[in-house]
Amino acid sequence: MAALVRSLVAAALVAAVFLVAATGIYASLDRILADIRYSLTNRAASTDLLFVDIDSSSLARIGVWPWPRDVHAEVLDRLMELGARDVAFDIDFSTRSSDAADAAFTAALNRAGGFTYLAAFEQPDGASGRIVLNQPIAPFLAEAVPVIVNVGTDTQGLVDRVPLGLAVDGGILPSLAAALAGQPPRTADVLIDYGIDPHSIARVSVADLVDGRVAAETVAGRQAIIGASAIELRDQFAVPRFGYLAGPLIQALAAETLKAGQPMRNWGPWPGLATALLLAIGFAPLGRRLKLGPAVPAAALVMLGMEGAALLLKAEAGVMLSTASFHIAVLFLLALRLLDAFLVEFAARQRAQARLAYLARHDEVTGLRSRRGLIEALHGRSGETTLLAIGILRLGQVRGALGQGVHDEALRIIADRLAELRLGELALIERDIFAVALGRPAYGPALAAFGPLIRNALRPALALPGHSVHVDVAIGSVTGDDPAERLLQRVEMALDEARRDHLRGVLAYTDALEQAISRRRKIDAGLRQALASGALSVVFQPQVRLSDGELVGVEALVRWEDPELGAVSPADFIPLAEETGLIVPIGGFVLQEACRIVAGWNWTGKLAVNISAVQLQVSDVGAAVAAALGGSGLPPGRLDIEITESLLVDRSGRVAATIAELRRHGIGIAIDDFGSGYSALSYLADFPFDKLKIDQTFTRGLTADSSQAAIIRAVTDLAQRLGKLTVCEGVETEFQRDLLTRLGCDVGQGYLFGRPMPGEEIVALLERCRVGAQAGQVGCSIPFRP
């Protein structure tokens, strides 16, 4: 039974590989293999053909293209004088030129006595899109034979075939290749044999021909094909093996293919499919008896055998095979054998681990390893491993409300569900904390996948006696080869951080995390002292009107330089300040200090100050603003209060009331980081505002045809219709500034105009602007500072 299953799986795998081949995914590999076969069956062309080349030297000698028709007449006469058997022009003669030149060429065609072929081809009509046939003009058709010069391509756009003929008005027009090879025209295609070396086809330059430098023996008895290889004339096509070839040479190779008398045929992947299915059926009797050592060379021999057969068919019968699918199928069969061996080994290892599990120390309630048992288990490991800590939330309430027995039953159910996931070695290391040792390192997406996997397992309510309880989890992880005790300490540190930040994913421990926790503790301890000691300072970032470069505003930002911690980023201490409530005095300090500094400048621009959600919710922002304006003398109309989008969803009415009070006093309201979170037109309608600050995520990576550009255009259009200004953050390049100007953004802010800087630098800038204005300069901006 197992052998039959292996055969069915192998056959299904082979079928899947060949079904995928229909999408063209293996086309590049097939083309490489075909090119190798063409190279290995390389042969010279016959001596029947002569390529009369319109090359760069001919263009330099005769003049720019298109040439006068009397030049073509001269070329034809010269070839006929030198004894050419036939002459074929791979040139478009479907339009008239001058009457004299057309007459000269017509006369030359007449003198050639009907041994001339002129190109005809199908192409889409530019106006209607219909396929039309372009033929030489009537006077030429009366003296020569029209032939089709269209080509066909494969799925990769490489020219691999030409038609033998084209049905026209009840008859069949021959192709150039068929005419030169003396083949009857048919509405069928012929595959081109790229085993023929195009460089072996005799070639002369038109320049040499008209200058009399071509000997008669070079031309006599040959069929001449006149066409362009000059790059300037763009008659080049992508082809197998050779990369690019001139159109006339492709026609010559097609004619040589027909002259060889062995038509090329393409049998596609079907012989390979049949062979691969036979191998799949043979997978059953061989099965596990085929040892892993011989399996790899055996697969290589099979693949080489298929390529040898394909090469022989090409050389002896002109048959092309698509063998890439076969090779992929063989590799998958080999992988299936390796997987089979792996699964056998894995199952054996699992059984051995199960036997050893009885010796380990376990938790009394769940039967899982305890902390000590997990440590002992981890001591025997080698190399890096990933350890997960899964904190069960809300179980403490279950124990307090329903008793220890119900709590224990909940733990057993959770343990069973986690055990069903088979993530690794499962343990209960604390009362409500499980740990899983994966036995291998896990990073990135592989690590993140454990979060939803574990949550989904615990999402169904726990069915307890007389109760139904829902639980959630926080998950931390650590990866390393440290001692088990150290790993547990670090994973619990990551778990505590995940609980603190209410993270839904898996928080991985890093050295930076431990340092950040230590640093956060120091920041928390030093923040009050910094506020009292004056270690906080206010800096300003310029806001520039994009239309003329005028400095129209600044945004006030807080900075903290600590003697021990160094420069502390606002991203580090502002969240802590919001947690502890210190954001209220810090925000008040920034507001008062910024108003005081800006009021002392000889300038009438705007000052923007951020107000956090905590300030609006727990303090009297209106009173703080009034105090700052009153103490500094800054006019209310020069102050903008920036609030984030998240405040727009406040349902208490406090935010709306505060905004209304501020606007009554003439203070502007700007919505900061617009587009990064809660953007909705209904909120804009409910909350009056003066400016929209478009978040820098839309500016980063901005291009003219990007979705960011479309969104910025929509926002600026909306703002203009509402009579509001827009400020685009994160402007770092001249390209962004120019594009944002075209998109309708009013004001720009970013490193292009200046990093946050002390007030003294703004004053110096304003002085430069004033001097520049007196000198007749327009606009004032700050150069980019890396």
Image (spheres, rainbow, N blue to C red):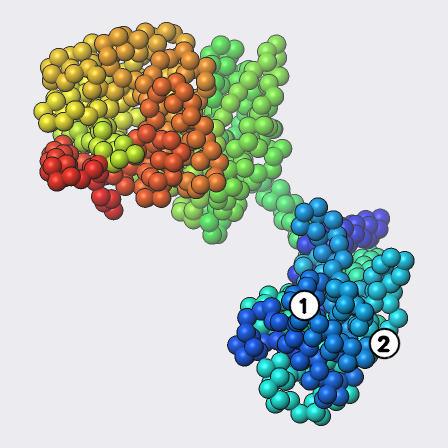
Q: What residue is shown at x 70% (from left), y 66% (from top)?
A: 93
Relative to the observer, which residue lies in front, 635 or 593?
Answer: 635
The residue that mark 2 highlights is 182
Residue 454 visible in this rendered orientation of the protein: yes
113 left or right, relative to 752 = right
The relative height of residue 153 versus residue 520 in the rendered view (above or below) is below
Q: Is residue 705 left or right of residue 622?
A: right
Residue 351: x percent and y percent?
A: 65, 45
Residue 467: x percent and y percent?
A: 59, 11
Residue at 62%, 42% in the rendered image: 354
Tell me what residue is drawn at x 76 percent, y 57 percent: 133
- Whether 445 is drawn above or below 275: the answer is above
The secondary element bearing badge 2 is classed as loop
Q: Looking at the image, can residue 522 be seen?
A: no
Task: Give residue 661's quadrant in the image.
Answer: top left
Badge 1 crowding class, 10 Å Cα cut-off, few under 14, some 14 to 19, many 20 or more, is: few
Q: Is residue 655 above or below residue 156?
A: above
Marks 1/2 in contact by CB < 8 Å: the verdict is no
**Tag 1, which secondary structure?**
helix
Q: Amino acid at mark 2?
A: Gly
The image quadrant of residue 669 is top left
- Identify the residue at the far front of this view: 100
Q: Which amino acid, by three-letter code, is at mark 1?
A: Asp
Residue bearing the label numbered 1: 99
Q: Which mark is residue 579?
A: none
Badge 2, how many Cα within 10 Å: few under 14, some, many 20+?
A: few
